[in-house]
Amino acid sequence: MSKRANFGCVLIFASLMSGCGLVGDVYQEESRRIINYLLADFPLPNDAEIQKVPTVILGTGTGIAGRIVLESDLSPAENLIFYGNSTQGAGWGLVSSTVAEEIILIYTKEGRHATIEILRRGRGIGAIAGGSSGSQITISVVHPGAIQEQNPYLALDTQRSGLDRAIAQKD
């Protein structure tokens, strides 16, 4: 193979690889723009990257429900401090918190509920070297009225007879 052909192959490969980075950057920009519109009043860490696959958002404005999964280079403790400082200014009130290996924060605002779960990522070079391995942050938001029925899974209960289910559904 000639040097020119080798150079051409290397150039094409480099273009494809750099294009993958550009696609990821475009996804992050577009996703952040959409999430900022839908959750304009909910703080997100600036360094966090939105994870495409497990993220799902339904509705708009105060009618939003869904889950956003982020990865952050900051430690769980640093993200805990971020949410402690930024949610109050955005009008969200802390309802419940559990701070342990897994951090769970529950906030409310105008009837909406937001649950933040912060976990240590624990993978990658940072964890091996003993440094901070960052966090995975899952934010679940639900609006008032999203839960219409208190036990929507009753029909799945095979232990109950048909008559028991009918009576329970009437109540």
Image (cartoon, rainbow, N blue to C red):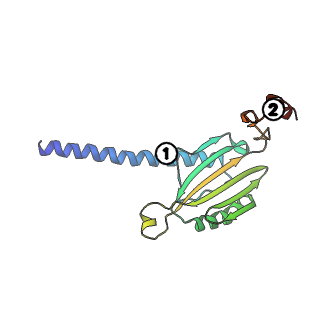
Q: Which residue ends up furthest to the left in the rendered image?
A: 2
Is the N terminus in the top left, top right, bottom left or bottom right quadrant?
top left
Q: Is residue 126 above or below residue 61?
A: below
Q: In this view, does 41 lie above or below 159?
A: below
Report the front residue among 29 and 10.
Answer: 10
Q: Position of residue 82 (x, y in %)?
A: 62, 65
Between the residue at mark 2 and the residue at mark 1, the CA separation in whole angstroms equals 46 Å
The residue tagged 1 is 27
The quadrant where residue 57 appears: top right
The residue tagged 2 is 165
The quadrant where residue 102 appears: bottom right
Dot in front, 2 or 1: 2
The residue at the point 64 percent across, 52 percent down is 139
The quadrant where residue 78 appears: bottom right
Q: Give the crowd class for mark 1: few <14, some 14-19, many >=20 residues within 10 Å.
A: some
Q: Are marks 2 and 1 in contact (CB under 8 Å)?
A: no
The residue at the point 67 percent across, 59 percent down is 104
Q: Position of residue 62 (x, y in %)?
A: 73, 45
Q: What residue type is labelled 2?
A: Arg
- Secondary structure at badge 2 equals helix
Q: Give the crowd class for mark 2: few <14, some 14-19, many >=20 residues within 10 Å.
A: some
Report the front residue among 63 and 150.
Answer: 150
The residue at the point 50 percent across, 49 percent down is 28
Q: Where is residue 45 in the image (x, y as percent from the top left)?
A: 58, 59
Report the front residue among 119 and 111.
Answer: 119
Q: Earlier in the sequence, mark 2 or mark 1?
A: 1
- Secondary structure at badge 1 equals helix
Q: In this view, does 19 lie to the left or right of 135?
A: left
Q: Count the marks: how many? A: 2
Which labelled disc corresponds to residue 117?
A: none
Q: What residue type is labelled 1?
A: Tyr
Q: Which residue ends up furthest to the bottom in the rendered image?
A: 130
